[in-house]
Image (cartoon, rainbow, N blue to C red):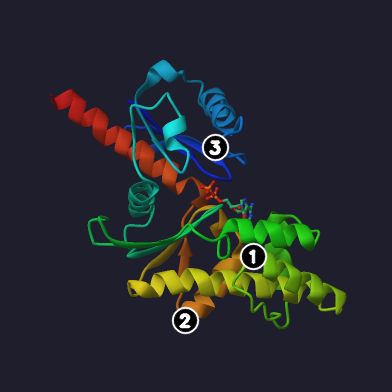
Amino acid sequence: MYTMGVDVGSASSKVVILEDGERIVTANVVQLGTGSSGPQRVLEEALAASGLKMEDMTKVVATGYGRFSFDQADRQVSEISCHAKGIHHLVPSARTIIDIGGQDAKAIKLDEKGGVSQFFMNDKCAAGTGRFIDVMARVLEVTTAEMQDYDAKATEPAPISSVCTVFAESEVISQLSQGTAKENIIAGVHASVAVKACGLAHRGGVTPDVVMSGGVAQNAGVVRAISKELKQNVIVAPNPQVAGALGAALYAYEDALKAMKK
Ligand code: ADP
């Protein structure tokens, strides 16, 4: 039996096709989010990669900021529930999830069964999100994917004191003009994101294991900064950007089983 999870995010679109609630047949990402051709493109890519058709999917669940715009789903489930389900499946020991996406950041606390006991979210401000990093990368003339390589060479993170993305951008420009090394500015950008994310996590208490999900978890510089801030090891979920889509595919599998029992 095949089920599909579709995560229509603000920055990217993700699809996971699951066989019998266990095996990931394909996991695809298109770096274009809701309101773009991203959702349709990632769907086509996933079907082409798996050699399957939409009719082969017993159930489809959509999640993410743009989940209500995806009309081929049987139902929609919140990103919090889907990240929790996906991460519990991948890392059963996870008790605190830090999920940093394109335009929001979340801290989710899990119980032993993977249920959500508490969550805290910042979706009001770009600071502390992927968008903040993307804006700074542009000013620094590096790609988002290159940010971690620069961070690894930093000797001393440059202080980024502003909590506002627009003012922080001015600070970065000013640091550049003063001749501060790009590596150190980038480490400062990552430290700023880490402080924000950890502020959310501390609100519910940080219980190990701490696991990161979302697109920003692919940035080893942010992961390092968060580990330093929390003073503990942080696990990066395998293929962290698709954790929400995986959770959606798992919900779709549970829905399919329930429908069979009826
Ligand atoms: P959403 O679900 O809100 O669309 P994602 O979880 O896909 O967001 O995260 C998007 C963010 O992930 C981007 O803003 C970017 O900063 C970051 N990102 C995406 N790809 C990479 C990469 N290869 N390396 C580092 N960061 C990345």
Q: Is mark 3 within 8 Å of ligand 1?
A: yes
**Location of residue 61 (image quadrant):** top left
Q: Residues within 10 Å of mark 1 (few under 14, many from 20)?
A: some
Q: In the rendering, at what x and y percent does residue 20 appear? A: 32, 32
Q: In the rendering, at what x and y percent does residue 186 appear? A: 71, 70
Mark 3: secondary structure: loop
Q: Tell me which amino acid carries mark 3.
A: Thr
Q: Which mark is residue 231?
A: 2
Nearest the eye: 13 or 203:
203
Q: In the rendering, at what x and y percent does residue 16 appear? A: 45, 36
Q: Which mark is residue 34?
A: 3
Viewer can see residue 59: yes
Query: For the N terminus, which image quadrant?
Result: top left
Labels 3 & 1 near each other (Cβ < 8 A): no
Q: Which residue is mark 1?
A: 165
Nearest the eye: 168 or 147:
168
Disc 1 versus disc 2: nearer the observer = 1
Viewer can see residue 107: no
**Location of residue 2 (image quadrant):** top left
